[in-house]
Amino acid sequence: MCGRFTLFAEEVEIIKAFGLEQKIDNFYEKRYNIAPGQKILAVVHDGKGKRAGQLQWGLVPSWAKDPSIGYKMINARSESAHEKPSFKKLLTRRRCLVVADSFYEWKQVDGMKQPMRIHPKDRDLFAFAGLWDRWKDGDKELVTCTILTQEANEFMQDIHHRMPIILPKEKEDWWLDPQPQDASYMVEGIRQLEMEDLEAYPVSMQVNNAKNDLPDCVVPLTS
């Protein structure tokens, strides 16, 4: 599961890390507690090159009758995504990078849920493997996304049984390749990804409320 994450890197760092040729200052703002239903920074390949933009977090499939389904589709299980009508077609040609610098998960500690901030040990910026779609109803249009998840690795098992898929840096272009790909092939490629080392530390209960989007959310708790 991935229900909250952060992105507060400088604009120039994001542009450099993802090889973007455009500025993003017209829509990018630092975020310390990103929640489902909100706009997030994502990177797609439009057939000519990488392009950054905003997607709404919570997938609304193009065929959906009710857009509120998006709140139930913030994550997609990678192991079975190629079998699900909502995700199979998207795996073939509508893949995206969801840009982040950490994510939150809640760990059971003495009968309570303690929020933990988790991030790769060796890099400050990374991308979740995401899928996106476009939904229209008359004049109304939504461009939305979901984050793929997998079973927790050994490190994460102590915190939660699922985790978002963090793409290795060298696999980001593979994931964004605009050429149509077989959905099963993409799922198998995900399965073979090497997981990098992660770090985690407890943070304030402020994270529990999505209205709290402040630098305090990422400050380590002191004993």
Image: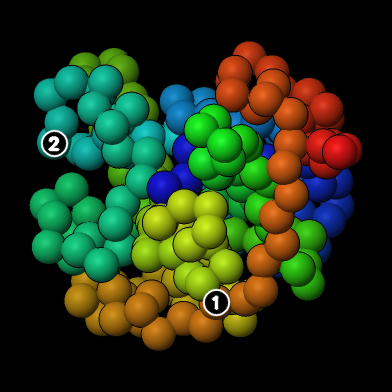
Question: Which residue position is annotated with label 2?
Answer: 63
| Side (left or right) of 2 relative to 14 | left
Give 59 or 162, whichever is nearer the viewer.
162
| Side (left or right) of 78 relative to 156 | left
Whether residue 139 can be seen here: yes
For image coordinates 48% across by 62% down, the residue present is: 157
User: Looking at the picture, how far across and down is residue 156, in whole percent?
Assistant: 53, 62
Q: Quadrant of the C terminus?
A: top right
User: Looking at the picture, how far across and down is residue 172, in whole percent?
Assistant: 55, 72
User: Above or below — where is 105 with respect to 138?
Assistant: below
Corner quadrant of residue 177: bottom left
- Kindly identify the amino acid type of the residue bearing the numbered disc 2: Trp
User: Looking at the picture, how far across and down is residue 75, in whole percent?
Assistant: 36, 46
Contact check, label 1 and label 2, Cβ < 8 Å:
no
Q: Secondary structure at mark 1?
A: loop
Corner quadrant of residue 167: bottom right
Going from N to C along the chain, the mark reached first, 1 or 2, is 2
For image coordinates 52% across by 83% down, the residue present is: 194
